[in-house]
Amino acid sequence: MRELGEFLGWFTVVFFSLSFLNPVVKYVQKTFGKTLLKKEALKKPWQMFMKIIVKNHRLFGLMAALGAVGHFLVQYSRWGFVLSGVVPAVLMLLQGSLGYLVSKAKKETKKTLLLVHKIIAVLMVLAIATHLIQMG
């Protein structure tokens, strides 16, 4: 059971990280797309990488949320309630819900929801790091 719990935890971290790259690659493209990424050696690999990240953002987020739920269930059965793990798990579920709302929102509310979605992503990085440090 220990190995399954650890696997699901790292599975969650990997897919959350891939999902987190979405705004990062968009920022890099917007900021450096006309200069650095114009070089042929960088252009094609970058475009392929960016396409994978942007196209699969929702899938990566869903996989991270499913991994977090599985990790929580396995670890809860072993250790009980661990606050440093519950905080990122709750943020992950809130993040998924917000992501869904962003995709369905009307233009007037979409910008605000997207901002909150991005803020929670940063909070999740801090919460996951805290959890890893405490459990490590």
Image (cartoon, rainbow, N blue to C red):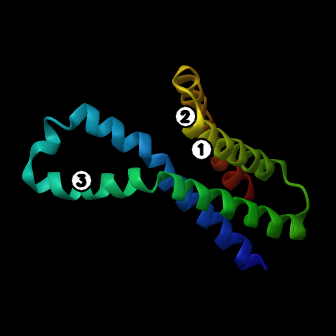
Q: Which mark is residue 23?
A: none
Q: Which of marks 3 and 1 is nearer the N terminus?
A: 3
Q: Are marks 3 and 1 in contact (CB under 8 Å)?
A: no
Front residue of 31/78: it is 31
- Disc 2 element: helix
- Name the spot of residue 91 as percent of width and height, x first: 71, 43
Q: Which mark is residue 125?
A: 1
Q: Can residue 80 be seen in this view?
A: yes
Q: Which quadrant of the rendered structure holds the C terminus?
A: bottom right
- Name the spot of residue 103 as percent of width and height, x first: 55, 40
Q: Name the amino acid, label 3.
A: Trp
Q: Can residue 136 be seen in this view?
A: no
Label 3 and label 2: CA atoms lie apart by 23 Å
- Name the spot of residue 16 as percent of width and height, x first: 56, 54
Q: Earlier in the sequence, mark 1 or mark 2?
A: 2
> For the residue carrying disc 2, how many other residues have a C-alpha within 10 Å: few (<14), some (14-19), or many (20+)?
some
Query: For the point 67% across and 69% down, which residue is it?
Result: 8
Quarter of the figure with residue 11: bottom right
> For the residue carrying disc 1, how many other residues have a C-alpha within 10 Å: few (<14), some (14-19), or many (20+)?
some
- Disc 1 element: helix
Q: Do the residues labelled 1 and 2 touch (CB within 8 Å)?
A: no
* Apparent side of residue 72 relative to residue 132 in the rendered image (left or right): right
Label 1 and label 2: CA atoms lie apart by 11 Å
- Name the spot of residue 30 as percent of width and height, x first: 27, 33
Residue that mark 2 sits on: 118
- Disc 3 element: helix
> For the residue carrying disc 3, how many other residues have a C-alpha within 10 Å: few (<14), some (14-19), or many (20+)?
some
Residue that mark 3 sits on: 46
